[in-house]
Amino acid sequence: MGLFERIFRIGKSEVNAAVDKLEDPIKMADQVLRELKDSYQQAITGESEVKAAALQHRAEEQKARTKAGEWEKKVNDLLDLIEEGKLNAAKGNTLATAAAESHDQSEKQANEFAAMAEKEEKALAVMETAIQQLKDKISETENRINLLKSRAKTADVSEKINKTLSAVDTDGLMSTLDRMDSKVTATEFRAQAYAEVRDNTLSSEQEINKILGSTSASSALDAIKAKRNANKTA
């Protein structure tokens, strides 16, 4: 592989990658649907034009055949007049010949119109099949786009959530929480230690007052309880 060919392939690959990044799946899918619908409308318009032409040629065919029938009748009428002696044979044959030629010309035109109409009708049959297939393809595309939009929405939300979750340092956060818990525990231990140290540093008088204070409070409570019991028995 030559150098320029390798450079070309690398450049082409980079361009394709850039284009791929720019492509929005939903927008591209909608564009596909629009193109299919545009093609469908063009096909319908073309079908209508061909159908109109076929109908017109069938009408022209019928008109020409009617005319041919009229000329054939005139030929027969002229021959009848000749046979009946009501018309000069030479003149009658000349007129009958002219009428027969007109008959043949009308028949030829009728056959030409019939051939054109038949060709157009065959084209219509092919068109109708293709148009129905295109219509089915549009329906299939609409269903796929609805599913694609649903999938894209789910994927987008999932991507955002997973991206957010992937950025969360749970181990680090738990480690921080453990350190904070340890700090609080250490503070609790220090508070308890300070309390024990304070009790150990009380003077004898303070310790006696502390004990007596607790006793007095207890005696006061006992006195109120005794009074309540006395009121109940009175």
Image: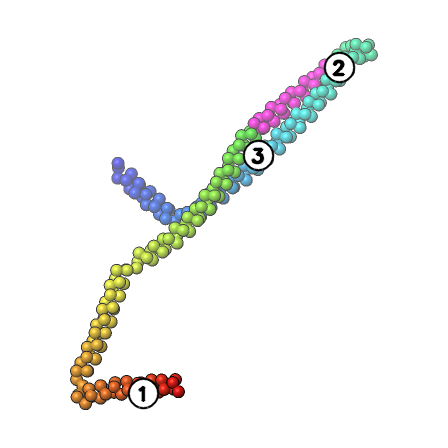
Residue position marked by numbered label 1 in the rendering: 223
Q: Which residues are magenta?
A: 95-122
- Residue at 55 percent of width and 33 percent of height: 128
Which-is-in-front pick, marks 1 and 2?
A: 1
Which amino acid does the dot numbered 3 rest on? Glu
Q: Decide: marks 2, 3 in contact (CB < 8 A)?
A: no
Which amino acid does the dot numbered 1 rest on? Ala
At label 3, counting other C-alpha atoms closer than 10 Å, the crowd grade (few under 14, some 14-19, many 20 or more) is some
- Residue at 79 percent of width and 9 percent of height: 83
**Rounded to the nearest whole Å, what is the CA distance between mark 2 and mark 3?**
43 Å
Where residue 76 is drawn, which disc sits there?
Answer: 2
Query: Which of the colour schemes (rainbow, by chain, secondary structure, one colour) is used?
Result: rainbow
Residue 38's spot in the image, x, y percent?
52, 41
**Rounded to the nearest whole Å, what is the CA distance between mark 1 and mark 2?**
152 Å
Tell me, yes or no, whether the highlighted magenta stretch contains residue 130: no
Mainly helix, strand or loop, the magenta region? Answer: helix
Left-right relation of 205 to 50: left
Where residue 60 is drawn, which disc sits there?
Answer: none
Tell me, yes or no, whether the highlighted magenta stretch contains residue 113: yes
Which amino acid does the dot numbered 2 rest on? Asn
- 180 and 9: which is toward the camera: 180
Left-right relation of 203 to 136: left
Inspect this view and state whether residue 199 appears: yes
Q: If you read the primary sequence from the N terminus, does the residue marked by circle 1 or circle 2 appear first?
A: 2
Q: Residue furthest front?
A: 233
Residue position marked by numbered label 3 in the rendering: 47
Quadrant of the image occupied by residue 105: top right
At label 1, counting other C-alpha atoms closer than 10 Å, the crowd grade (few under 14, some 14-19, many 20 or more) is few
- Residue at 30 percent of width and 85 percent of height: 222
